[in-house]
Image (cartoon, rainbow, N blue to C red):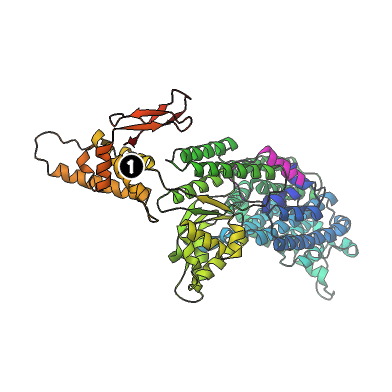
Amino acid sequence: MKQLVTDYTFHPLIPGAVLAALVSPPSDEAPSRSWYELLHACNRRDRGQLYPWLVSQGWLSEANAQRLHAVETEFVGVFERIEIKIPELAQVTQTDEMAIKQLARSLTAARLLWEWMEVQIPPQKSFEKTDQGTRDLIQDLINQFRRFVGAAWGIFFPAQAFGLSADAAAQFWTALMNCDKPGEMAQRFQGYFFHAHRERFMALNGGPLPKRGLYLQDVISEYLEHARERFDTLHQQVATTIGIGLDEAFSQIADLSRKLELRVELIHFVAHLAEQACDAFAHLDGHPSPKEIRILSYLQTTMNETCNTHGQSEHAATYETSESALNAVLGELDELIGMETIKQQVHQATHFARVQQMRLSQGLKAIATSYHSVYTGQPGTGKTTVARLMGKIYHALGLLKKGHLVECDRASLVAEYVGQTAIKTNRVIDSALDGILFIDEAYTLAKQDQDFGREAVDTLLKRMEDDRGRLIVIVAGYPESMQQFVASNPGLESRFTRMLAFPDYQPNELCRIFSSLCRQNELRMTPGFKQRLIHHFHDLYANRDDHFGNARLVRNCFERVIDLQATRLATTVSDAVLDLATLVAEDLDGLSVSALKALEATVGYQVVCPECQQAYRWTPELSIKDAECTECHRIYNSEFGDPVV
């Protein structure tokens, strides 16, 4: 890590790896070897190559790339102007030339990094609401680093060490940390320390000060006269941070970095800058004392521990843990009843996303794609359930930071008055950032007579572009209506390229869903109840229309059944203990005439192996969930059989 964030081969202030870590998408995974190889590759690219590459990865917009490059050019110019002055400064102030350069580099780099953060970190991350008001986390981080540097100066140049080198060190760090205008930083860094005034500045080391009275006063004599006062005032300002200790001061820097969700590489780089500033202060006036060496050693150890703690908390789950989480979600998907084609498509999307992440980790260009999807199907076919699982899958893969699901419909997005729809839509989208926005019955936004709906679509398309990498949108609805919706706007057609068609549940699958509800509520079904249930769902499926309720229909049926069971039990006159956990045939009413006729005409039931199509006899008395085919040895669900008429 140390080598990674201190490689200045292609840049005098901030290595390419640090810039890449700042602009790359957030990830909850622990840094992998391939990630570090990618960062090392960034260090080997000069800025003419690195910025276009970051843009090509989708990590950085063209506009932000230009802004970051302009800021960098400005601060590199500041450092280069200071660098030219360093030999003269070292001679005039009797300080170490290399220490001055090291201090100038570390503090100028810190200023550049803060400016980059102002450009790159979005407002929703950089502000925090508290009981005392809204905190600007970036400004808090800047102020805390400034306090750390001031306290370091106060420790290495204590009150009793007043002199020329202490005065010069104070001017160096305040010029770079407190000056708001980069164009003036180099001038303030040098101040009055010119060769022409060298002898006069020796007065700060115990020489005679110019006498007041008839002698003319100039800026140098005024500077010298008030030097001690300035020194004491600055010491008073940094005393509080000195009191809490540099280790605690840096720990607060790490805490703010965590709030800003900065990658661990960035906090290591900030630690490097802080360490370099302390080391420069220790060497400015010559060789550091044994006490100063001891302080430096302690700071290096504690700051390294703080960085490691930050990394562990930021990436508490290892790569294997992420793999485990992914496997758990896919296992949950596979346990869903039915929807075999949907499961295959989800697995394919997972494989594709995994390979994309692998390409990025190896420094390869991401294949242009869209994860936005269209889910078509009748109500109750599992669209929302699968969308929620997709959020968990993309989170486990590192595509989405949170992976949560925000459900909405037309009423959630469209307002009643002109100009309010965009505000309302943006508010919903903001809540879905770093997760999935699921819009049910999205086709209602494209009604020809609904201008406000089109405004919501236009707002959505803009945010999908602006927040790509942080937002995945899934639109859902009836098949034909969704085809018309996507075709109604070229922007929708180009972005929604993944189509998942959710089929109606088969009668056998509807029975299995009902059975799962029974297990969840500790209920069991008698053979007679099972028979009626099978024929009930077969009849409903055979006569279904465009509004067939699927799983919702099963839920309604289950609630009707437990109501009837409760009525039966409540009206039973018996001293025997009531069987509260059993559903009997009379608890399921409402069977149609055709269902009752099919029940009477049924001569038996069968289950069929989905692999080899071998049929087996099934009876309602069986209480098994899975069976093994004796022909192909495929294990398949055999909880309910199909009637043989």
Residue 58 is situated, as x and y percent measured from the top left of the image, at 68, 54
> From where the camera sits, is residue 555 visible?
yes
Residue 634 is situated, as x and y percent measured from the top left of the image, at 47, 27
Residue 232 is situated, as x and y percent measured from the top left of the image, at 68, 60
Q: Nearer the viewer, residue 310 or 299?
A: 310
Taking the magenta stretch, the answer to whether it contains residue 80 is no
Q: Nearer the viewer, residue 188 or 366?
A: 366
* Direction right: furthest residue: 196
Instruction: Work out whether 86 lies above or below 641.
Output: below
How busy is the neighbourhood of tag 1: few (under 14 within 10 Å), some, or many (20 plus)?
Answer: some
Q: Quadrant of residue 642?
A: top left
Image point 50% across, 64% down: which residue? 427
Image point 72% across, 54% down: which residue? 56
> From where the camera sits, is residue 236 visible?
no
Image point 78% across, 65% down: which residue? 188
Question: Which quadrant holds the N terminus?
Answer: top right
* Direction top: furthest residue: 630
Q: Quadrant of residue 198?
A: bottom right
Question: Which quadrant holds the C terminus?
Answer: top left
Amino acid of disc 1: Phe
Q: Is residue 249 left or right of residue 36?
A: left
Image point 52% across, 39% down: which residue? 325
Instruction: Work out whether 192 lies above or below 530.
Output: below
> What stretch of residues is rendered in magenta?
26-41
Q: Is residue 609 left or right of residue 188?
A: left
Q: Nearer the viewer, residue 268 or 643?
A: 643
Taking the magenta stretch, the answer to whether it contains residue 31 is yes
Q: Which residue is mark 1?
A: 514
Q: Is residue 561 left or right of residue 16?
A: left
Instruction: Work out whether 536 lies above or below 121.
Output: above
Mark 1 lies on a secondary structure that is helix
